[in-house]
Amino acid sequence: MRIVCTAGIVIFLAAIGIAVYMMANNMGQAPGIDFGPGQYYYTDIPGWQKYFLPDHYDNPVPLSILIVLFFAWGFLMYRLWAYLDRKMK
């Protein structure tokens, strides 16, 4: 368990370090668009709908089914977490 905790801390610190490095070197920004810090958000890109909400895509699954599946997945993951927690003690 100590190895898992140490690995989690190392991964967390690495993620923070990489994020700071990316921001310092202006990585991940849309080229040619300068909106300041907000340029990381898709809605700040002019005409963002044509890139992220194309009209030709239609989801065949109703939204209500997707919501039910989302909560079912969350419930299953909770049950798995509780089971693993009991087994690890």
Image (cartoon, helix red, strand yellow):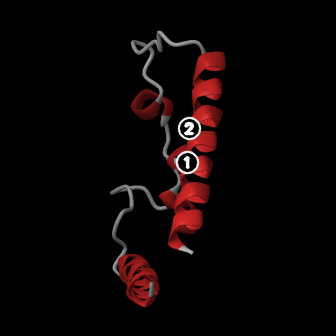
Give the crowd class for mark 2: few <14, some 14-19, many >=20 residues within 10 Å.
Answer: few
Disc ID at residue 1: none
What is the CA distance from the residue labelled 2 to the residue labelled 1? 6 Å
Who's the residue at 60% across and 18% down the image?
65
Image coords of residue 52 (percent x, y): 44, 33
For the N terminus, the image quarter is bottom left
In the rendered view, does 47 fall on the left or right side of 75? Answer: left
In the rendered image, residue 38, in percent from the top left (x then y), is placed at 57, 61
Q: Residues within 10 Å of mark 1 (few under 14, many from 20)?
A: few
* Image location of residue 9, percent across then percent down: 46, 87
Look at mark 2 in the image and give the residue it sits on: 73
Where residue 44 appears, as percent x and y from the top left, is: 55, 49
Q: Which mark is residue 77?
A: 1
Q: Quadrant of residue 26?
A: bottom left
- Whether tag 2 and tag 1 are in contact, CB under 8 A, the answer is yes
Residue 33 falls left or right of residue 79: left
SS at circle 1: helix
Is residue 13 rendered to the left or right of residue 31?
right
In the rendered view, would you say 70 is above or below 23? Answer: above
The quarter holding residue 75 reads top right
Residue at position x 50%, y 47% in the image: 42
| Residue at (52, 61) in percent of width and height | 84
Which three-letter amino acid code belongs to the residue tagged 1?
A: Met
The front one of 35 and 14 is 14
Amino acid at circle 2: Trp
| Closer to us: 45 or 76 | 76
Element marked by disc 2: helix
Q: Looking at the picture, does residue 44 appear above or below residue 27?
A: above
Is 82 in front, or is 34? 82
Task: Tell me if I can see residue 35 in this picture.
Answer: no
Check the picture and name the quadrant holding the C terminus.
bottom right
Q: Say which residue appears at 59% left-offset and 64% top-offset.
A: 86
